[in-house]
Image (spheres, rainbow, N blue to C red):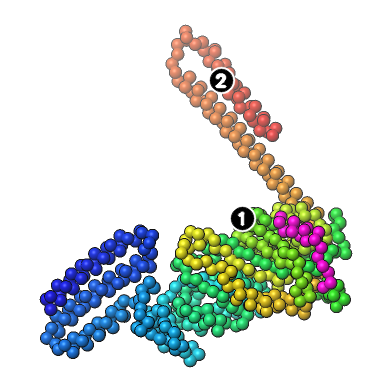
């Protein structure tokens, strides 16, 4: 027992020295924080096993060899519970628990308190297997026709409400966290509107790790919502804050660009376009067949591309959302690119794909930009109205149906370059087969089928009024004139305040000089009494004459 105590004390000190060495190596790039935590865990658990074995040996020194063997087995079980296998450790296949399908479990079952009520449950007759909880980014797509948008809203059928239920049913979230997104740090990259689809939506959430996580989620999700892939990320990752750009796609039927029967006329038009009601419009079979037979010309496509290019850059899009204020700085958004593809025919309808990439978008912004481009092309209106729409304080712009809008991709280039080093980027390219297999029947065929059945875009087109583009341009000019007048007025007021300041300063200087001269004793032989007052008046007049030209120049300007 004494020899054992000495040897284990030596082992204790050696493990402490190893811990200090590991801590000193934390700054090296070759040793990650995960490996450092694993080594520290090994050293601390070795210390606990050493002391436990020493005290047990000293208390049972007179026991038999069979009792010693039983104690060794108990110690082995205790070390297994106290020292969980880390990610970088390798466990022999013979000691790893087997799954029901015969595969080897890569990590041991979790034993934390928040998982105890979950391990005993079953999912479709199979026991749920849980591993360590990690922060993940999940790539998904959905068909948004029957959903009231992405963000969860009590009493509404939303995508997030379905996801929350699916995470729990798949065994990736504990019972205590199933009803609260804050506990699992859930965040979406883009908040899509009602009826908008997605093929590149990314959400961040803290989930129990399982090698079959994607399959488990797709088994419990409805067929119009699919998960394509996931990556383990750092705890500081947030899908909304870490995303630096979003790319949307709008599938526009080209017959929406058919020239209007009432083209643009100067001084004629309906300024307020909010009175449009496309649901009340009727499109006959003959009209719709003529629309389907229309083919877009290269000249019309080029004009549409030139109009879309005017949206690039940083502008105030207060007129492209509901209740926008031109004085609100949050209405300014940056768009890096806005392109239009070549026409293609799909299920008898000719389409062009409009792709816009921007830092972020406000409510209805993309649909109103597309609608304003359609009106300008159809009416052959002045493209200067696009720039004017950024300056006019208020004008109601039209909005295309949301059925053709698709979220294509969320960009995290800055995160992968700086904070996400070592993390494999979650981009759509590796999952293109799965994405295309889902997109064709659930997105593109669905958009075409709805258009052929309901003719929503066709009804919207025939109900378009003639926009008063001159009114929009004149409104922006009036605002610029008002701003220029206010700028001149403020500059004049500033110069007048400065002139008053100089005048008061001169008066104070004159009073101070007169006071100092009167307090100085002088003899009657040195300075005559009759000359003292004219000297003061001359000094004051000289100072006033210096200020007068400044004041007159300010008033004249």
SS at mark 1 in the image: helix
Above-or-below relation of 34 to 222: above
Is residue 556 found inside the magenta-colored segment of the image?
A: no
Query: Which x, y percent locates residue 379?
Result: 83, 60
Query: Which x, y percent locates residue 187?
Result: 53, 70
Residue tagged 2: 539
Q: Residue furthest bottom?
A: 125
Magenta stretch, main secondary structure, is helix
Residue at (51, 61) in percent of width and height = 415
In the figure, residue 1 lies in which quadrant?
bottom left
Q: Nearer the viewer, residue 397 or 293?
A: 293
Residue at (85, 58) in percent of width and height = 264
Q: Residue furthest top?
A: 525
Q: Is residue 170 left or right of residue 405?
A: left
Give the mark nearest the N terminus, 2 or 1.
1
Quadrant of the drawing holding the C terminus: top right
Q: Nearer the viewer, residue 110 or 431?
A: 431
Residue at (76, 76) in percent of width and height = 347
Q: Nearer the viewer, residue 271 or 221?
A: 221
| Crowding near the residue tagged with mark 1, few <14, some 14–19, many ≥20 C-alpha atoms within 10 Å | few
Residue 276 visible to an observer of this rendering: no
Residue at (53, 24) in percent of width and height = 510
Residue tagged 1: 329
- Tag nearer the camera, 2 or 1: 1
Query: Which x, y percent locates residue 554?
Result: 66, 33
Span of residues in magenta:
292-310
SS at mark 2 in the image: helix
Above-or-below relation of 88 to 215: above
In the figure, residue 161 lies in which quadrant?
bottom right
């Amino acid at each position: 027992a004494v020899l054992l105590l000495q040897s284990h004390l030596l082992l204790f000190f050696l493990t402490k020295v190893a811990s200090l060495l590991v801590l000193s190596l934390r700054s090296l790039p070759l040793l990650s924080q995960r490996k450092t935590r694993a080594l520290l865990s090994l050293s601390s658990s070795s210390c606990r096993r050493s002391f436990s074995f020493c005290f047990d040996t000293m208390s049972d020194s007179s026991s038999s060899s069979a009792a010693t063997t039983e104690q060794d087995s108990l110690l082995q079980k205790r070390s297994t519970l106290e020292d969980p296998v880390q990610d970088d450790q390798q466990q022999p296949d013979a000691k790893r628990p087997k799954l029901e399908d015969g595969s080897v479990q890569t990590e041991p079952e979790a034993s934390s308190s928040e998982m105890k009520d979950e391990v005993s449950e079953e999912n479709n007759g199979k026991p749920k297997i849980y591993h360590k909880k990690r922060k993940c980014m999940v790539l998904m797509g959905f068909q948004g026709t029957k959903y009231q948008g992405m963000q969860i809203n009590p009493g509404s059928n939303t995508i997030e409400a379905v996801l929350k239920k699916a995470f729990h049913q798949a065994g990736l979230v504990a019972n205590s966290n199933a009803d609260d997104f804050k506990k699992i740090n859930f965040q979406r990259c883009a908040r899509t509107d009602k009826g908008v689809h997605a093929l590149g939506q990314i959400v961040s959430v803290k989930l129990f790790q399982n090698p079959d996580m994607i399959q488990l989620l797709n088994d419990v999700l409805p067929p119009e919502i699919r998960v394509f892939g996931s990556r383990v990320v750092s705890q500081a990752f947030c899908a909304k804050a870490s995303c630096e750009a979003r790319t949307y796609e709008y599938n526009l039927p080209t017959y929406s660009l058919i020239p209007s029967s009432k083209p643009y006329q100067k001084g004629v038009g309906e300024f307020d376009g909010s009175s449009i009601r496309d649901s009340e419009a009727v499109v006959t079979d003959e009209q719709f067949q003529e629309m389907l037979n229309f083919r877009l010309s290269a000249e019309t496509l080029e004009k549409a591309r030139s109009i879309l290019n005017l949206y690039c850059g940083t502008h105030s899009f207060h007129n492209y959302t509901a209740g926008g204020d031109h004085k609100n700085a949050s209405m300014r958004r940056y768009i890096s690119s806005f392109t239009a593809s070549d026409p293609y025919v799909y299920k008898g309808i000719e389409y062009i794909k409009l792709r816009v990439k921007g830092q972020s978008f406000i409510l209805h912004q993309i649909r109103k930009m597309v609608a304003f481009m359609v009106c300008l092309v159809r009416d052959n209106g002045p493209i200067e109205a696009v720039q004017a729409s950024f300056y006019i304080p208020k004008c109601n712009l039209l909005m295309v149906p949301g059925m053709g809008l698709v979220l294509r991709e969320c960009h995290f280039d800055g995160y992968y370059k700086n904070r996400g080093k070592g993390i494999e980027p979650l981009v759509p390219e590796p999952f293109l087969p799965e994405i295309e297999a889902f997109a064709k029947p659930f997105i593109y065929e669905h958009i075409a089928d709805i258009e052929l059945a309901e003719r929503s875009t066709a009804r919207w087109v025939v109900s378009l009024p003639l926009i008063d583009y001159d009114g929009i341009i004149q409104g922006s000019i009036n605002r610029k004139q008002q701003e220029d007048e206010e700028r001149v007025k403020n500059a004049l007021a500033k110069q007048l305040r400065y002139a008053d300041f100089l005048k008061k300063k001169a008066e104070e200087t004159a009073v101070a000089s007169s006071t100092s001269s009167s307090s100085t004793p002088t003899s009657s032989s040195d300075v005559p009494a009759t000359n003292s007052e004219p000297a003061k008046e001359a000094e004051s007049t000289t100072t006033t004459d210096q200020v007068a030209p400044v004041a007159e120049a300010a008033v004249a300007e």
